[in-house]
Each structure stands twice: as C-alpha cells, then as structure tokens.
Image: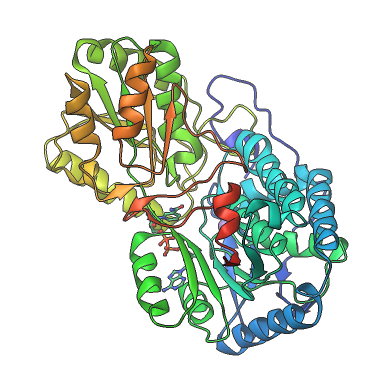
Amino acid sequence: MSANDFLSGGFAPAPESADHFKIKKNYDLYIGGKWVKAAKRFKTTNPATGEVISQVALAEKKEVNLAVKAARKAYDETWSKMPAAERGKYLFRIARLLQERAREFAVTETIDGGKPIRESRDVDVPLAAAHFFYHAGWADKLDYAFPGAKVAPLGVVAQVIPWNFPLLMAAWKIAPALACGNTVVLKPAETTPLTALKLAELFDDAGLPPGVVNIITGAGETGQALVEHPDVNKVAFTGSTAVGKAIRRSVAGTGKKFTLELGGKAANIVFEDAPINEAVEGIVNGIFFNQGHVCCAGSRLFVQESIAVKVIKKLQKRMETLVVGNPLDKNTDIGAINSVEQLERIKTLVKAGQDEGACLWQPSGGVPRKGNWFKPTLFTECAQSHRIVQEEIFGPVLAIQTFRTPQEALTKANNTPYGLSGGVWTDKGSKIFKMTTGLNAGVVWANTFNKFDPTSPFGGFKESGIGREGGVHGLSAYCDLKI
Ligand code: NAD
Ligand code: MN
C-alpha cells in the first residue's frame, strides 16, 4: 500500500520515512539480558493497512517463570546492592539513548499501533524520555523524597501495560521501578509489542545489567501468569477495569503491593464565560487525541445551555478539517483504530447510542478503504442513562450534554462509575476552584486538557483504579517505606 492510497485531507502527502531503521521479522523474549526463544509466536499488524509487521514470541508459564527468576537474581545480586547514584546513571543513559533514537521509536510506535506520527513524535517519545530523566534524578535522593522514612525497594515488579501508549506506559512503569531499586518483568499489549522490544535493545546498548528489566510478550494469559506469579512483590497494571478487578482479586491476601490504572469517562465542562475558540480546541484535543484511545479522554462534553448551539457549530466546523488517514503522514490528525476488536467495540457502542435515541453527527470526509478506521463522531441529545454516556468507548466518539448551573454540571459529571480526569473551561478563577474541588476525579485540567508531566501524579478514583503514577506519589508506590 502506498501513501497515495490514503486520503490526505487536501494536503500534499507528507509521510515520515520508515527506511532508516529495521523492524525485525521475528522477536524473541528478553530475559536475563538474552533473547530467549519460545515455542509459539503471534503476529503484530499495522492497523492502518492490515499488514503483518513482525512475529513475536508468545511467553507461556515456563518463560514467565524464567523471566521472574532472572529478575529475582538481578535484584538479589546486582540491582538492590548497587549504589543509588549508579542506578541513576543507567536511567540517564537510557533517557539519552531514547532521545538519540527518537525518530525510530516514533515511527515504530505509529506503524505498530496506528497513532499519528505527529503524536508519537511530539508526545509519546519525548514524554517517555522525560520520565527516565525525571526518575534518574530521584534514584539517589529517595531519602529526601520521603523525609523521616527508611526507604527500601520492594523486589521484583510485574508490569502489564495497554496498547494505547505502548512506549510511554513502559517508561511510566519501568523508570520509577528502577529508580527505587526494583527489578522488572514487563508485558506489553499483544497488538503493540514492538517499542517495548526495541526498548530492550536499548537497555542492552545502555549496558543495563542482565535481568534488571525483562520484556515478555503475549496476551492476557501471559499477563495473568505474570501477575499471579508467587515470587512477584508488586503488580502495576494499566488497562481495562474488568481485568483490573480480576487482578485485585488475585493479589488479595498475597501481600503483593499493587497499583491499577483503569478506564475513565471524563467530563469536559465548558461555561458560557469560557474562551470559546480555545475551548473548542480543548474539546477536540480531549476526545480525538490518539483516536480517543485515552483513559483520561474528555469523552463527555458538558456545555452551558446558553452557548450550546454556538459551541456545537464551531466544533462541527473544526471537525470538518480533521485529517483522518495515514498515521505516518505528518498532516494526519486521526490515525487508525488500534485493532479490529476495538473497532467492533466502538461500533457496538455507537449503535447503542443511536438505538437509545441520541443524535449522531460525523464530518463529511471519507476514510481509507483498507485498515481500521472510525470517523470523528459526536452525539447530541444524550441522556445520563445512555450507554454512550456511562460506558468507556475508547474511540473518537464524544457525548454532548448541556447544563444551566455549576451544581448541575457537577452532579451530572460525577454521575459515573469512573473518576480519572476532568476539564473545566471558564474565565473565572472562583469557578475553577469550585469545579476542580467538586469533581470526583484524580486529575482535573483548567482551560486546557491532556497535559502530562513526569512530576505530576496521575491516577483515579472509583472504577478508574487505585494508586498514582508520576511525581513523588508515584515513586512511593515502588518503595517500602518504614517510618
Ligand atoms: P485489557 O485490560 O484486556 O488489556 C490490557 C493489558 O492487560 C494487555 O497487555 C493485556 O494482554 C493484559 N491482560 C488481559 N487480560 C489479562 C489478565 N487476565 N491478567 C493480566 N493481564 C491481562 O484491555 P483491552 O481488552 O485491550 O481493552 C478493553 C478496554 O479496556 C478498552 O475498550 C478500554 O475501555 C479499556 N482500556 C483502558 C486503558 C487505559 O489506559 N486505562 C488501556 C487499554 C484499554
Ligand atoms: Mn500492531
């Protein structure tokens, strides 16, 4: 398939080149600093074309055991004994190597997962490097992070991550774990294993001692075997609420520490005194960033009734300009849906929205023929009881409702099983304080959306999970603190 097979939204195609590095035809498991073969393999595809990119090893119980064993050995013999400043040096080195190979990682992320190159290049990769830099700095300063406490590592950490931010989630998980002196077994998602495997190559280049990080690939069964392994001291999971609940049941009574970062259904609330054009950009960024495959996506829009018509009109006009197509093209705003399964999930929920009486609107442009695509979509006439208002769609679909008073906005916004994030748009500082304190969500943005920084803790309430990642809060989740 050539770049010309994609739509380009009226722009001349501007595809990023993908010929300056190699994606191998086969990948094995990275265990104990070596590439270990498994009996079976599975395919990872490019969701924008359906083409198979690579065949990846499937880790079963035997390989999970090997990986945990390697992590335990590295913990006992090397990593927990190393002076903290030395651990920090490895993390700095990893961060710098990632910056050096930024383009390779960005292109790989986009080919394997479908997200626009503009996002993998400007968000995923730089933020991943920032997480390694940030935690590198903490490695020898943990006593200052937790004054008065005796800080010790936990041991071997099992980490399972999703497909929406494959490299970034690997960095969020690995960097703090290593900074605090733990060793890691990480399992990336089955549709997006490649940047984690490239990260393993990079760890090798950084001279990271064998077994400090082990990368094993596979699907749910591999993840389950890993988190249930008896020699694991902590489980860190990001993914669906259903699997998060199963993991919480499995760790109960084992003494394993755990953090769960699960789904969301964020309210993005726009008041009549908001800067409307900026708010419209914020709405677009909130729901269409990464095709809406974002746990903190602003998937429920609440607009004050007096400006609803104006905001929706402006939003529709803006949506007409969004370029859906080749993720490798630098003009692309909305890339491919990550998998056939996810596309089906989105279609099912959108159909439920129509069946339940909400009113669907999509821009007039088309989508490419091959691959997994879904047009940016908005629904008006939504009710609190609709599935599209209550359930996480994890796609480019926005459910719009109106409100008259701040209290009504809060009541509606908090009427959800989730509590991960939220957004408020207003000119008034006092309203910002009322709303941000009133919203039952872990992260609330004011007059902006989807802003991330390694220094800032991220995590949710209720069915959005438990524990924080990033900042000092995130660090504490990887330490044993004796007061
Ligand atoms: P999932 O929870 O099934 O997968 C996430 C990760 O967990 C993957 O690596 C997967 O292999 C692994 N996994 C699956 N079953 C497991 C088990 N029993 N034990 C341990 N690990 C297991 O998510 P999904 O099916 O890919 O997506 C389903 C829905 O989850 C999406 O529609 C979305 O709503 C939500 N989701 C949320 C996030 C997030 O960032 N919070 C990320 C991905 C998906
Ligand atoms: Mn893939």
Viewer-proximal residue among 352 and 465 = 465
Along the horizontal axis of the image, is 178 left or right of 434?
A: right
Along the horizontal axis of the image, is 195 left or right of 266?
A: right
On screen, 407 above or below 234?
A: above
Q: Residue 267 falls in which quadrant of the image? A: top left
Viewer-proximal residue among 8 and 124 = 124
On screen, 111 above or below 389?
A: below
**Residue 68 visible to an observer of this rendering:** yes
Q: Position of residue 351 (x, y in %)?
A: 22, 45
Q: Quadrant of the C terminus?
A: bottom right
Q: Ligand 2 falls in which quarter?
A: bottom right
Viewer-proximal residue among 384 and 133 = 133
Looking at this view, name the residue that lies furthest to the bottom: 62
On screen, 66 above or below 166?
A: below
Q: Position of residue 481 (x, y in %)?
A: 58, 66
For image coordinates 46% across by 55% down, the residue present is 339
Viewer-proximal residue among 427 and 475 = 475
Q: Quadrant of the N terminus?
A: top right
Q: Position of residue 413 (x, y in %)?
A: 25, 35
Along the horizontal axis of the image, is 169 left or right of 295?
A: right
Q: Position of residue 227 (x, y in %)?
A: 50, 77
**Residue 363 visible to an observer of this rendering:** no
On screen, 405 above or below 161?
A: above
Counting the numbered discs, the total is 0
Along the horizontal axis of the image, is 218 left or right of 263?
A: right
Colour option used: rainbow
Q: Residue 482 falls in which quadrant of the image? A: bottom right
For image coordinates 57% across by 58% down, the residue present is 476
For image coordinates 45% across by 45% down, the residue present is 293
For image coordinates 68% across by 63% down, the residue present is 180
